[in-house]
């Protein structure tokens, strides 16, 4: 059964204060496996989960009627990646982010580490989707590849793709776990727990949303990496929802909602960590609190994502009206389709996106610039010429603000809940 393992932290001398240098007894949390769990979900939570799964299906079904499928998919993926980074304290305004994106694409120093790390999260989400739809089963190497992609642009790329060999902890001092809020399992237990987690990801014991929520909570509990656990764990949600077929085209930007509900999000993960028997009602009750929150956040993200999908349609229709007749499958037609997910392009990047020559792409870019759809900007010391779709940038900023607002445009708010005390070792 799940348990607290008592360990001794030997005094060290790295810290500046006596508290940082002290030794102490501390407790690490060892969770139960997920495979074979006879989970019992209360009726009201099961209804919330069913509503959320229906909302994800509706978003994906409705998405097939939108004028810009690729652009919408990129738009929502970008929103999810930005939200996941915000939870970790990495926030970059939209225009700041795209400026760094252009610099990175050209192999230059962006001079903005935070924006570069957010870009790493976007790349990791893209990697997660590719792996979710191209490998079977999803294994440890695939998980490590996602983490490696995430950390590649961080300040500590050497940590990428490496399962931790030392104890880590959350909260308290940077030098010891004596005052930590939560201490994950000891390093010698991590590989077995990951084996169980990945086996669970490759099964269908529970419904897709339940599986995604439990896999994420278990991953965060294991905390298998020295850094980047939160963002990798949220990428794992995409892996599950794609593999199970619930979200074949669009995963709603759940992380933008959770970034706003950060205190409730952390409390939900803490409530998931129980000390009862593996198939006990207490374990299911603890999980139900987390499942309720995850389902509510998912449904909220779906509602606003659909609203913004409609706005993308209206925006694209307005562009086409400005341009007049556009030949189907022309470079201009293709560029209009991808712009919602790529709000700043160069001729080179646009050429890669639409798969057309630079000469044809340049003609399309110029046509959109003449119509006022794209606006030329010069970025960096080298004054690189790029073109931004200001309508998309404004729309994306609006999505961030809407999903990051407790009032928002929907009635969904964090479910009222008790915040349980931290579990203690049974006596």
Image: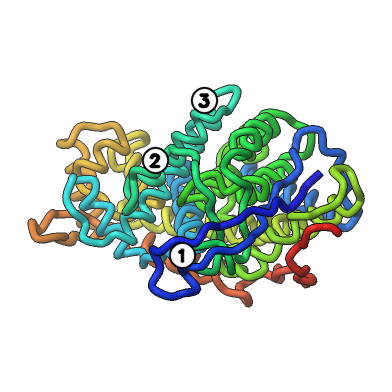
Judge from the rendering whether residue 153 lies leftward or rightward of residue 251; answer left or right. Answer: left
Residue 149: mark in rendering: 2
Disc 2 is placed on an element classified as helix
Q: Residues within 10 Å of mark 3 (few under 14, many from 20)?
A: few
Mark in the foreground, 3 or 1: 1
Q: Secondary structure at mark 3?
A: helix
Q: Earlier in the sequence, mark 3 or mark 1?
A: 3
Closer to viewer: mark 2 or mark 1: 1
Mark 1 lies on a secondary structure that is: loop
Q: Quadrant of the N terminus?
A: top right
Q: Quadrant of residue 413?
A: bottom right
Where does the image place residue 31, in percent across and percent down from the top left?
72, 46
Which one is in front, 103 or 408? Answer: 103
Alpha-carbon span between mark 2 and mark 1? 25 Å
The residue positioned 21% from the left and 52% from the top of the image is 103
**Residue bearing the label numbered 1:** 174
């Amino acid at each position: 059964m799940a348990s607290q393992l008592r360990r001794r932290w030997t005094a060290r001398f790295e810290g500046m204060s006596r508290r940082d240098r002290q030794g102490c007894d501390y407790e690490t949390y060892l969770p139960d496996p997920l495979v074979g769990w006879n989970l019992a979900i209360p009726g009201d939570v099961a209804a919330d989960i069913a509503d959320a799964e229906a909302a994800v299906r509706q978003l994906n079904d409705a998405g097939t009627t939108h004028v810009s499928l690729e652009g919408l998919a990129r738009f929502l993926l970008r929103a999810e990646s930005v939200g996941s980074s915000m939870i970790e304290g990495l926030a970059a305004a939209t225009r700041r982010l795209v400026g760094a994106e252009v610099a990175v694409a050209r192999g230059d120093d962006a001079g903005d580490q935070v924006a570069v790390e957010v870009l790493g999260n976007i790349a990791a989400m893209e990697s997660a989707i590719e792996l979710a739809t191209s490998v079977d089963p999803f294994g440890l190497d695939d998980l490590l590849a996602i983490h490696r992609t995430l950390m590649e642009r961080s300040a500590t790329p050497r940590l990428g793709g490496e399962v931790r060999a030392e104890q880590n902890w959350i909260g308290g001092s940077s030098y010891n776990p004596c005052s930590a809020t939560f201490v994950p399992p000891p390093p010698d237990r991590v590989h077995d727990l990951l084996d169980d987690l990945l086996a669970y990801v490759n099964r269908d014991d529970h419904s897709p949303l339940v599986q995604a929520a439990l896999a994420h909570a278990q991953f965060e509990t294991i905390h298998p990496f020295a850094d980047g656990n939160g963002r990798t764990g949220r990428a794992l949600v995409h892996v599950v929802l794609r593999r199970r077929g619930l979200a074949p085209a669009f995963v709603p930007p759940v992380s933008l909602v959770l970034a706003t509900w950060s205190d409730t999000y952390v409390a939900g993960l803490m409530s998931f960590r129980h000390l009862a028997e593996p198939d006990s009602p207490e374990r299911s009750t603890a999980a139900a609190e987390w499942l309720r929150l995850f389902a509510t956040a998912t449904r909220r993200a779906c509602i606003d994502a659909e609203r913004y999908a409609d706005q993308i349609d209206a925006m694209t229709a307005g562009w086409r009206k400005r341009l007049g007749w556009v030949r189907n499958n022309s470079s201009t037609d293709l560029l209009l389709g991808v712009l919602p997910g790529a709000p700043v392009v160069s001729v080179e990047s646009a050429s890669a996106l639409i798969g057309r020559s630079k000469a044809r792409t340049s003609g399309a870019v110029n046509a959109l610039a003449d119509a006022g759809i794209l606006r030329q900007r010069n970025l960096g010391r080298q004054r690189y010429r790029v073109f931004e779709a200001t309508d998309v940038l404004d729309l994306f900023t609006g999505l961030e603000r809407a999903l990051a607002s407790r009032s928002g445009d929907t009635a969904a708010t964090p479910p009222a809940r008790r915040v349980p005390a931290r579990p203690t070792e049974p006596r």
